[in-house]
Amino acid sequence: MTTIGLIGAGAVGQTVGTLLVTAGWCDAVMVASGSGRTAASLVTDLEDMAQVTGSHVRAVHAAPDAMSGCDAIVVCPRAAFTNTATSDVRMAGLAANAPLIAALGRCLSHYQGTVVVVTNPVDVMSRLFAATSGCARVFGVGSHTDSARYRLALARLLDVPVEAVAGHVIGEHGDHAVICASSTTVRGLPVAVPLREIRAELVHRPRRINAALGRTRSGPAGAVLAALAHALGLVDGVIELAAPWRGDWYGIPLRFTSGTPTVCMPPLAPAESVQLQTAAAKLRTAYEQTAVRTALRGDTFR
């Protein structure tokens, strides 16, 4: 029986739960949240959905420390804070979310399954969760969403089917994302990427969603399902996820074969290599400062 743990019942957690119930490839979804009230309510809503759609997937309310037997756990809680940042928007959640993620890591110490982290800044939070939990299979979504947006934007600008575009966005899920333009192809051929227009779309696309809906949800939730399907060996293929590489953590392409990942970095132009080094240094500094602060606290998830 395949069981997925879902920690966080906000916008993304609700959408992930919905997708898991309708996808039907797992047998149970265990839901937890900080207050417990939202988790219990989400379980009730998912039960209704399973009944009306004929899904066999069972939703249950559970505490995080009861999820040790889950095949995978999705970590998507968000601390209560008001984000007023106009730049580096995702990094603005660092101080608020880090104690929460560190507490969850300690709660799930040495969990043996797969963890998919969504909470921003996702590259730093993934590393922090891995460090505090000791879990060996931690991945962060973010770069997969960025890459999907990149391919979609480029396809529209060039008036080609999105399926014809192959290219990655790596590094930070944020202002220092690296567009791998030099290795991008359309129908297998190199292409001149209009970087200014692409960068503008990558910045403004999530802001348009947030302005009208309050929070991005469907795209990140879809990235979570893709990450789970690859990491659990349901499908093989390449997906961009935050993972450890050469001493740092950031978004990189991973080729999954029967659930086993191998790094498959594209060739980078000199400028892209410099951008990646800059992103790595930024994320490393943020993690080191955060790790020191959270080490001095003994927060528990509640």
Image (spheres, rainbow, N blue to C red):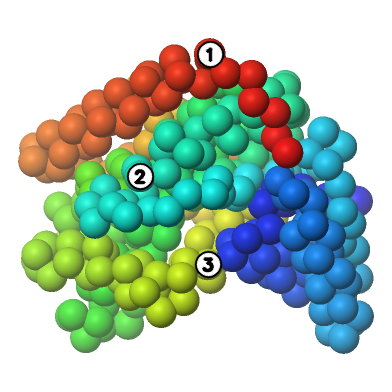
Residue name at image x 23 percent, y 45 percent:
176
Residue name at image x 34 percent, y 28 percent:
286
**Callout in the foreground (3, 1):** 1
The first of marks 2 and 3 along the sequence is 2
* Relative side of 260 to 275, left or right: right
Residue name at image x 57 percent, y 18 percent:
297
What's the distance in space between the residues labelled 2 and 3, CA to CA?
18 Å
Q: Is residue 9 visible?
A: yes
* Relative side of 255 to 68, left or right: left
Q: Secondary structure at mark 2?
A: helix
Q: Quadrant of the C terminus?
A: top right
Answer above or below: position of 192 versus 121. Answer: below
The first of marks 2 and 1 along the sequence is 2
Residue 56 position within the rendered picture, expressed as x and y whole percent measured from the top left: 91, 70
Answer above or below: position of 290 versus 164. Answer: above
What's the distance in space between the residues labelled 3 and 1, CA to CA?
33 Å
Residue occupied by mark 1: 296
Closest to the observer, 65 or 123: 65
**Splitting the image into 4 quarters, where does residue 190 fall?**
bottom left
Residue occupied by mark 2: 92
At label 3, which amino acid type do we have? Arg
Answer above or below: position of 66 versus 15. Answer: above
Residue occupied by mark 3: 217
Residue name at image x 44 percent, y 28 percent:
244
Q: Secondary structure at mark 3?
A: loop
What's the distance in space between the residues labelled 2 and 1, CA to CA?
21 Å
The first of marks 3 and 1 along the sequence is 3
Residue 288 position within the rendered picture, expressed as x and y whole percent measured from the top left: 38, 19
Other-residue count near label 1 (Cα within 10 Å), few / some / many at <14 / 14–19 / ≥20: few
